[in-house]
Image: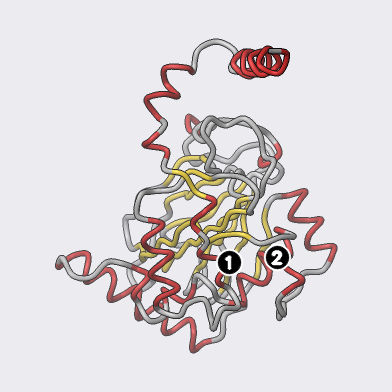
Amino acid sequence: MTNNEFENSYVLSQAEVDRFNSEGYLIFNGFFDDNLTQLLKEDVDQLMVNRATNGETNIMVFPALGPLTSEPTVVDRVANLMGTTFTHHHIHARWQGEGESGVSWHHDYEQMPQTNRSHLMVHVFIYLDGLNGEIGDLLVLPGSHQRIMARDAFRQFMYDDLPGSVTIDNLSPGSFIIVHSALQHARRPKPGGETFRRYFIDTSYCQHGILWPAGRRLCHLNQMAIDLGWDRNGKYTFLYDNSCFFDPHDYIEKFNTRNQGSLALYLTKEINSKHKGTKA
């Protein structure tokens, strides 16, 4: 199924698609309505309490956070970028306060090992109270998603400015940013937070067509989303398709054994072996 086979309520312009492909991110400033933003904040507040008191922390069962994984405001725009169906990979949520530490430069593209960008993975960064220059600024390095590199390739630079990097520190409440998962980004710690909470949610989606690494609980969570009705009467059932994932824990030992020298040589051996079998 392509994204044209379901009614897409939010369509990106070609200029937006081109900008995403070039720069690796798109900002949607203040796009969530006030009611949804408030409900999400209430869920995040309860989630933070539950984490401190050993309560329920499964985000998928929260009444606003769970269906956020199929929120049309987000998902329909992601569909424009994907050009085909795709699957939900994860959702994280928390708020950050005064004295929050930073996060060094990194990217989040799931691949083992990092060798290509044949298929699209995106993260959606959601800022329920926006950004105002307190607690933490988002840093991005436009175009870095076009380079193949380890996740921590720039980690030694911590959260310093890099040539061409952009600081995002002024967003309205209810804003979100769709980020190519291979885009290098960081969070620079900032003072403040005495009266401001940095509400942050990230969701992630993977384009269909290959197998993606995923945690062992993901299949359970995606099935739970369908059982709870987050597929919105079947319109977004494809979001919770677990057939495009593999558990990397099942392959790490074998991969570490074979990860020596040029991996292309293993492919050559397999091709030669198949040719010999055909001739026989």
Amino acid, disc 1: Phe
Residue 223 in the image: above or below residue 64? above
Label 1: which residue?
Answer: 238
Q: How far is mark 2 from mark 1, CA to CA? A: 9 Å
For label 2, the crowd category at 10 Å Cα-Cα, with few meaning under 14, some 14 to 19 and many 20 or more, is: few
Q: Is residue 150 left or right of residue 1?
A: left
Nearest the viewer among 58 and 265 is 265
Is disc 2 in contact with disc 1, using a CB cutoff of under 8 Å?
yes
Amino acid, disc 2: Met
Residue at the spot 65% in from the left edge and 16% down from the top edge: 277
Mark sitting on residue 47 = none
Q: How many marks?
A: 2
Residue 218 percent across, percent down from the top left:
40, 56
Q: Which of the 4 quarters of the picture holds residue 153?
A: top right
Q: Is residue 192 left or right of residue 3?
A: left
Label 2: which residue?
Answer: 1
Nearest the viewer among 15 and 270 is 270
Quadrant containing the C terminus in the rendered view: top right
Residue 121 percent across, percent down from the top left:
61, 51
The earlier-in-sequence mark between 2 and 1 is 2
For label 1, the crowd category at 10 Å Cα-Cα, with few meaning under 14, some 14 to 19 and many 20 or more, is: some
Residue 206 percent across, percent down from the top left:
58, 54
Quadrant containing the N terminus in the rendered view: bottom right
Q: Is residue 197 left or right of residue 180?
A: left
Residue 241 percent across, percent down from the top left:
52, 61
Residue 109 in the image: above or below residue 45? above
